[in-house]
Image (cartoon, rainbow, N blue to C red):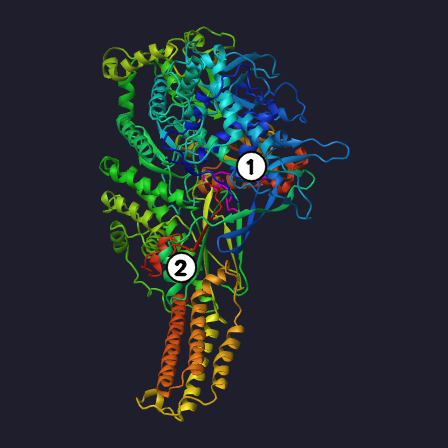
């Protein structure tokens, strides 16, 4: 799902692309006329596609195709009853005798860089008609032209003769047509992210001269969207335009006879955005660390969606060791709370003159802090339950039960900026039991509030946690539900979701087979050596049996070549592009090394006639095999360490979880990062 | 720069609504009249868009607002209109013959202001107490009230913060005692109306410093003028109707200030009043401008109802008419600047600060004069707005309140609160309110809709709130008995309305949400998302 509203506006200015085009496009000599119905349709599609209120449930099914690519299948429940009657009139595709009446319904937004075609099917497998990109762009352009006209009409200066707004509306319409043409061009062609538009002006050395039509268009734009004075329109309009130029709306035509529908489609294949540094990769591949393959996935979902399912499927040979999902659903709430804290801290002295006002602010802050503590504690409890039901239990990695805090201790800890879950939970308990009635008189107002604001941001308390509930080892599923009480009720900001998956080669794993193989080869070498020397003395004595070199070397050579070959043949080697290949790379190296050792020994047996040299060869081979066996055991030990690590060391795991589980180690980069937010 | 998308999607929503297939402007009707809801089945005047064809989707108003005080009522309905070509941003005209005696209707169109983004704002609601006696304001008090409206809304306006609504008079809130369990079951019964004002502003949550500044200035004003100040309880899980007292009402300070500022204003109660409605596209600072202009002409405000619907603001002011004013001028509508001399003539000059009081009030008086001069010119934010003025009508005041009269007679008007959510185009708000009045009739001797507001919300549902003033059939002086009677009446009426609605408007019973309660804070339904 690529519902992307949040992002960055270029530093050059929010409407920089539009201004560039106003300077570059030929001045139109006639208005760009769109049918009013198209403008209304475009605005309705834009409105609905940003909120997606009519999608109560959203599911994404991820399949890791290979290293670097992930396929996604998206399914949505559509409730047409959520679309208001007035919007339906706009979206209506009238029916006739044979054709049913239907609606154009936006079901997703996705980046313009995703060019693969999308085929939407309904619950019966029938193909659902879609609005073409060209048509969607045309109605979007019509929508912007209409919106601009409405803003001009509602502007204070529209009836002030001589003002720029009055001129573009009534007397100098060419300038308005130019703005409209620039908007249409921008929407139809699109604009790159974070780069200036490349126009013919970049190639020509033009003489600087005034151009009244273009100058008036630019001045009118400035009057309409003044950059200074806290104009509330500039950023919203610029954001809308930016999204329209970077994303497509996926619009399906749905019959009105069935208001509840289930749609599914395959999203374009998602390439990995990030690769770890080569040195780090090399270290993972050549050291006995029993590497995990960590995949991170980021997406955005509409805030209005009630349930979101994320499922992951990998090859059966791979196990999903950890899977957790975190969303920033409460981030905006925490940010507003932090800003409130900072504002009160800066005004504590002034507010102190109105004691009850300060008390109201403090109580408001306290109630929100308590709610945050309660919510995150519920998340942590769910995570503990997840760890407890893992097939391979996690070792005693969790922190010891914390000491219970008194109200004063809680306030003292908070004042010092300690917003750990333990402190927030204690605060919640004291607040709920009416133990914090007079906060204005406590030591909190002032510097302590700044510490709390910083602590809240550091611990990322606005991020929730959803954990895996799939019983299969090679699959995972997380079910996110909208919180019962929306803490930012007016917000339509999409919720950012990040999932962290640690993939591993669990039992029966390759390393176990290879350990057994290496041990077996060691025993074979030991057995042959013992048989040839007539005892175990060759292992530790400097004396060499003069008859150590066999008269018939062929049999020994055959054993040393055949046994490892047979053992190696039983190991299933994966494709070099697969995740399994990456997971087993080091282990396969150990297996190959053991075979190299025995093959070299076989060559030695076939060519060396001197008993002394051959004994040393056997000793060397056995030593090498023991070394390889130690590496195998190190791998097993490292696997155990990984298993006992309760929290993945990822930057996308909320800090409050890391600290409450006592994990203070630094985070590591994932092996693959997939970003479906359409920011490209 | 990180940009929030909430305002972008709000802009898209407003534009989409404004640019619907057949919607280019906002059509509205305004009705001024006498409050006839005590015994009538039709509680308030209601003018449709021209025909009564309920199959036509455009005949259903999307927003409705009604306010009644001092025996006068004002109602507003709005709906999207296909009208696109008219000069200016608002036009208004008289609608003849709405079929009701004593009421005057005006119709018009307005170009909504899509740039007025206030849905994503954090609402701060304020309750101002200007007295503890029962509501019967004198000329002097109306001037003081106008001054406070101007000062308070100016606090918001100068910070670029919109006033979302303003009503006066409203129900006062009794001080809760320490023994209050917190659920409202034990709280004292509220008076139906009192000398109080309730208004709300919308502030961007990211501008917490602006909010704190506003609240601090508000508290300072409260201290200066002596009025009581309560803010809505901003703690989580607190609902509308729960207040946090910042300052109690300082009777002496308030009386002194009022006397010093308006020493020459008569201390008599107005016998007549007229309704002035000022209409235009929503902007900040408009209420303060309108009230300041009137006050500069010595005209006070008896009652006020200000609301914004479909990005169009309706400032309804009930202004007292001087005893010596001409007996009757016909209803009138036109531009705001042209309306001013007419309002002045109709209301008569009441009072202006003079002598010692003028010296005391020099600060704001000078400001006012300068402001008045400026506002008369084109710079005023409402210079291009339109106004509708009713003829002077006889006004009346409630006979008693609990605090003043219940102990002896028991015949006291009590408020009952109503909240509802119904599918759009099933039942219009006036019809629903008539049903509510009919359902309450067996329990009451008088029943009047003091305030009602409904609007079309997401999901194609109409959501509304109302305050009904009832006088119970049975007279009781005992608090518990009255409370029990009120609760029973509300519960019975609620069930009766739920049974009646599916029969009269073919609405699916499972989609009816309606709550009638003598406690405002008991209205909300659980907002648990599924």
Specify whether B53 is left or right of A273.
right
The percent position of residue A488, horizontal first and vertical second, equals: 43, 41
Indicate yes or no whether the magenta region holds residue B520. yes
Task: Point out the residue furthest to the bottom here.
Answer: A534
Where does label 2 land, which residue? A648
Quadrant of the rendered image containing residue A315: bottom right
The percent position of residue B427, horizontal first and vertical second, equals: 62, 31
Task: Point out the residue furthest to the right here.
Answer: A97
Which numbered disc flags the more N-terminal residue, 1 or 2? Answer: 1
Indicate yes or no whether the magenta region holds residue A665. no
Image quarter (top left, top right, bottom left or bottom right) of the N terminus of chain B: top left
Q: Which residues are magenta?
A: B512-530
Where does label 1 land, which residue? A249
* Residue at figure coordinates x 38%, y 78% from the top left: A626
* Up-down relation of residue A216 to residue A607 (above or below): above
Q: Residues within 10 Å of mark 2 (few under 14, many from 20)?
A: many
* Up-down relation of residue A254 to residue B345 (above or below): below
Can residue A82 be seen from the camera position used here?
A: yes
Residue B284 tag number: none
Which of the pair B377/A431 is nearer the observer? B377
- Same chain under badges 1 and 2? The reply is yes
Kindly report the distance in space between the C-alpha atoms of the residues bearing marks 1 and 2: 35 Å
* Residue at figure coordinates x 40%, y 76% from the top left: A629
Can residue B414 be seen from the camera position used here?
A: no
Which of the pair B469/A541 is nearer the observer? A541
The chain ID associated with circle 2 is A
The percent position of residue A303, horizontal first and vertical second, equals: 49, 43
* Up-down relation of residue A532 to residue A115 (above or below): below
Could you tell me which secondary element the residue under label 2 belongs to? loop
């Amino acid at each position: 799902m690529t519902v992307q509203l949040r992002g960055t506006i270029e530093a050059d200015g929010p409407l920089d692309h539009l201004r560039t085009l106003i300077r570059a496009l030929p001045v139109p000599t006639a208005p760009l006329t769109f049918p009013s119905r198209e403008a209304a349709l475009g605005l309705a599609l834009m409105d609905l596609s940003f909120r997606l209120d009519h999608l109560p449930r959203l599911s994404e099914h991820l399949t890791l195709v290979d290293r670097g690519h992930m396929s996604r299948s998206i399914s949505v429940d559509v409730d047409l009853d959520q679309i208001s009657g007035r919007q339906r009139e706009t979206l209506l595709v009238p029916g006739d005798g044979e054709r049913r009446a239907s609606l154009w319904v936006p079901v997703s937004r996705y980046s313009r860089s995703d060019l693969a075609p999308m085929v939407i099917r309904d619950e019966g497998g029938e193909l659902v008609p879609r609005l073409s990109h060209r048509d969607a762009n045309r109605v979007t352009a019509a929508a912007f032209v209409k919106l601009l006209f409405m803003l001009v009409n509602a502007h204070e200066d529209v009836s002030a003769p001589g003002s720029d707004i009055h001129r573009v509306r009534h007397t100098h319409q060419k300038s308005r047509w130019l703005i409209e043409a620039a908007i249409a061009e921008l929407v139809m062609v699109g604009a790159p992210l974070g780069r200036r538009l490349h126009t013919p002006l970049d190639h020509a050395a033009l003489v600087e001269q005034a151009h009244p039509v273009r100058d008036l268009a630019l001045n009118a734009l400035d009057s309409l969207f003044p950059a200074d004075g806290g104009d509330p329109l500039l950023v919203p309009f610029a954001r809308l335009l930016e999204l329209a130029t970077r994303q497509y709306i996926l619009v399906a035509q749905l019959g009105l006879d069935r208001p509840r529908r289930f749609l599914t489609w395959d999203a374009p294949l998602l390439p990995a955005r990030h690769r770890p540094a080569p040195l780090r990769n090399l270290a993972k591949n050549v050291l006995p660390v029993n590497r995990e393959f960590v995949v991170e996935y980021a997406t955005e979902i509409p805030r209005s969606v009630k349930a979101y399912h994320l499922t992951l499927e990998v090859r059966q040979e791979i196990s999903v060791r950890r899977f957790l999902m975190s969303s920033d659903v409460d981030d905006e709430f925490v940010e507003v709370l932090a800003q409130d804290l900072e504002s009160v801290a800066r005004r504590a002295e002034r507010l102190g003159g109105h004691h009850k006002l300060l008390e109201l602010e403090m109580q408001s802050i306290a109630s929100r802090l308590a709610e945050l503590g309660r919510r995150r504690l519920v998340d942590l409890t769910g995570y503990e339950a997840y760890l407890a039901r893992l097939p391979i239990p996690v070792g005693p990695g969790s922190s010891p039960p914390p000491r219970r805090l008194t109200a004063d201790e809680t306030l003292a800890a908070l004042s010092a900026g300690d917003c750990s879950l333990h402190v927030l939970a204690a605060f919640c308990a004291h607040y709920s039991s009416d133990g914090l009635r007079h906060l204005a008189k406590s030591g909190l107002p002032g510097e302590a509030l700044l510490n709390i604001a910083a602590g809240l941001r550091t611990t990322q308390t606005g991020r929730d946690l959803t954990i895996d509930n799939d019983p299969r080892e090679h699959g995972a599923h997380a079910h996110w539900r909208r919180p019962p009480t929306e803490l930012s009720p007016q917000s339509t900001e999409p919720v950012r979701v990040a999932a962290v998956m640690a993939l591993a080669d669990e039992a029966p794993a390759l390393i176990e087979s290879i350990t057994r193989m290496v041990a077996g080869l060691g025993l074979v070498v030991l057995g042959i050596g013992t048989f040839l020397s007539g005892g175990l003395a060759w292992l530790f004595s400097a004396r060499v049996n003069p008859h150590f070199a066999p008269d018939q070397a062929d049999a020994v050579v055959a054993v040393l070549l055949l046994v490892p070959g047979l053992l190696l043949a039983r190991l299933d080697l994966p494709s070099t592009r697969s995740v399994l290949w990456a997971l087993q790379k080091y282990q396969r190296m150990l297996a190959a090394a053991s075979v190299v050792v025995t093959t070299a020994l076989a060559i030695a047996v076939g060519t060396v006639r001197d008993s002394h040299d051959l004994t040393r060869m056997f000793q060397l081979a056995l030593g090498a095999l023991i070394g390889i066996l130690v590496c195998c055991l190190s791998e097993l030990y490292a696997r155990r360490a990984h298993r006992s690590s309760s929290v993945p060391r990822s930057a996308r795991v909320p800090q409050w979880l890391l600290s409450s589980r006592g994990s203070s180690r630094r985070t590591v980069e994932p092996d693959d990062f997939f970003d479906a937010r359409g920011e490209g | 720069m990180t940009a929030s998308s909430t305002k972008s999607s709000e802009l898209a929503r407003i534009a989409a609504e404004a640019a619907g297939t057949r919607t280019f402007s906002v059509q509205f009707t305004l009705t001024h009249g006498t409050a006839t809801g005590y015994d009538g089945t039709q509680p308030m005047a209601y003018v449709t868009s021209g025909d009564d064809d309920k199959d036509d989707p455009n005949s259903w108003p999307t927003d409705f607002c009604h306010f009644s005080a001092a025996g006068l009522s004002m109602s507003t309905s709005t709906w999207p209109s296909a009208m696109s070509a008219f000069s200016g941003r608002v036009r208004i005209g008289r609608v003849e013959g709405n079929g009701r005696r004593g009421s005057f209707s005006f119709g018009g169109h307005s170009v909504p202001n899509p740039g007025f983004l206030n849905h994503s704002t954090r609402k701060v609601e304020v309750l101002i107490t200007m007295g503890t006696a029962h509501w019967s304001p004198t000329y002097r008090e109306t001037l003081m009230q106008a001054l406070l409206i101007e000062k308070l809304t100016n606090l918001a306006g100068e910070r670029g913060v919109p006033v979302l609504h303003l009503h006066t008079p409203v129900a006062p809130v009794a001080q809760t005692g320490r023994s209050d369990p917190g659920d409202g079951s034990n709280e004292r019964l509220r008076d139906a109306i009192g000398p109080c004002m309730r208004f709300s502003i919308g502030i961007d949550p990211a501008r917490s410093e602006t909010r704190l500044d506003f609240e601090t200035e508000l508290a300072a004003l409260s201290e200066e003028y002596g009025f009581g100040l309560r803010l809505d309880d901003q703690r989580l899980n607190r609902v509308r109707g729960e207040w946090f007292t910042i300052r109690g009402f300082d009777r002496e300070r308030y009386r002194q200030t009022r006397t010093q500022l308006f020493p020459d204003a008569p201390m008599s109660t107005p016998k007549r009043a007229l309704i002035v409605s000022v209409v235009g596209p929503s902007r900040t600072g408009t209420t303060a401008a309108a009230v300041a202009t009137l006050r500069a002409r010595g005209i006070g405000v008896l009652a006020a109802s200000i609301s914004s619907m479909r990005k169009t603001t309706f400032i309804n002011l009930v202004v007292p008419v001087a005893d010596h004013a001409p007996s009757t001028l016909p209803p009138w509508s036109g531009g705001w600047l042209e309306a001013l001399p007419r309002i002045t003539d109709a209301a008569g000059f009441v009072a202006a600060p003079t002598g010692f009081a003028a010296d005391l009030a020099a600060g704001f008086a000078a400001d006012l004069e300068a402001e008045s001069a400026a506002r008369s010119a084109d710079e005023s934010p409402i210079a291009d707005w339109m106004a509708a003025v009713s003829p002077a009508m006889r006004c009346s005041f409630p006979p008693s309140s609990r605090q003043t009269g219940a102990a002896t007679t028991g015949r006291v008007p009590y408020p009952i609160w109503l909240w509802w959510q119904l599918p759009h185009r099933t039942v219009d708000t006036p019809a629903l309110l008539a049903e509510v009045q009919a359902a309450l009739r067996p329990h009451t001797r008088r029943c009047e809709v003091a305030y009602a507001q409904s609007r079309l919300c997401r999901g194609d549902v109409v959501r509304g709130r109302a305050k009904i003033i009832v006088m119970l059939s049975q007279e009781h002086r005992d608090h518990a008995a009255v409370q029990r009677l009120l609760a029973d009446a509300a519960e019975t009426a609620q069930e009766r309305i739920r049974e009646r609605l599916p029969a009269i408007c073919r609405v699916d019973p499972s989609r009816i949400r309606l709550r009638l309660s003598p406690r405002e804070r008991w209205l909300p339904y659980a907002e648990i998302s599924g």
